[in-house]
Amino acid sequence: NNNNNNNNNNNKQKQRKEVKRLDPFSALQEHLRIKHSLSLCQLCVDNKMDFISRLPRFTKTLLNQHMSKGDTTGKTGFRGHPLCEFCRPKRFYDLTKLHEHLNKEHYKCHICDRLGKPNQFFKNYDKLSLHFDREHYLCHHPQCLAARFVVFDNEIDL
């Protein structure tokens, strides 16, 4: 019976140790947060090709400034992490990552693109369809509406 108690105690101690053990990066983040009230920008950590030791540490206020405005001194030219207007408050590392997201998750007007107004994105197909109807020539035949994207840039083609 004493042997069982020892085994149970050993198991509990092992479980406690396992729970407290963090990977080195998580340990660093926790240390920065608890001991210094600082944090790293997760977008920079995930995307910037640099050593963690070279990445800046931010207070909560400075992190928000970094995300939205970037380098306000103008030394680096960094202007913040771009925001997806449809997925607020979601931000992306740079314009390339934002455009990848927009092209994958949202809808782009191909008519505007063709007419020289690039990057006209809409949150979902319903919003794009409203745009088609207001700005272009959307076919209102039930079959066309069901097929989606049946829209023209002039009334003659409709």
Image (cartoon, rainbow, N blue to C red):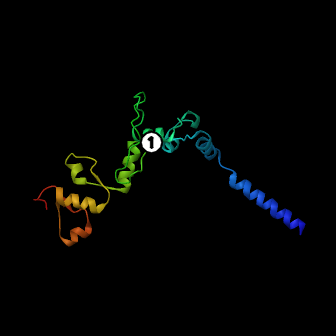
Q: Position of residue 41 (x, y in %)?
A: 50, 42
Residue 4, picture quadrant: bottom right
Report the side of 69 relative to 59 (left or right).
left
**Outermost residue, bottom direction?**
142
What residue do we see at 85% from left, 62% from top? Answer: 6
Q: Say if 116 sits above or below 156 in the image.
A: above
Residue 78, picture quadrant: top left
* Of the pair 34 and 8, the residue shown nearer to us: 34
Q: Say if 52 sits above or below 91 in the image.
A: above
What residue do we see at 69% from left, 50% from top? Answer: 21
Q: Say if 90 sits above or below 157 in the image.
A: above
Amino acid type of disc 1? Asn
Question: Mark 1 Cα within 10 Å, few/some/many (few <14, many 20+)?
Answer: some
* Of the pair 29 and 108, the residue shown nearer to us: 29
Report the side of 29 relative to 70 (left or right).
right
* Of the pair 6 and 118, the residue shown nearer to us: 6
What residue do we see at 25% from left, 53% from top? Answer: 110
What residue do we see at 65% from left, 44% from top? Answer: 24
Q: Quadrant of the N terminus?
A: bottom right
Q: Position of residue 124 (x, y in %)?
A: 32, 60
* Mark 1, residue position: 64
**Outermost residue, top direction?**
75
Q: Quadrant of the C terminus?
A: bottom left
* Of the pair 140 and 32, the residue shown nearer to us: 32
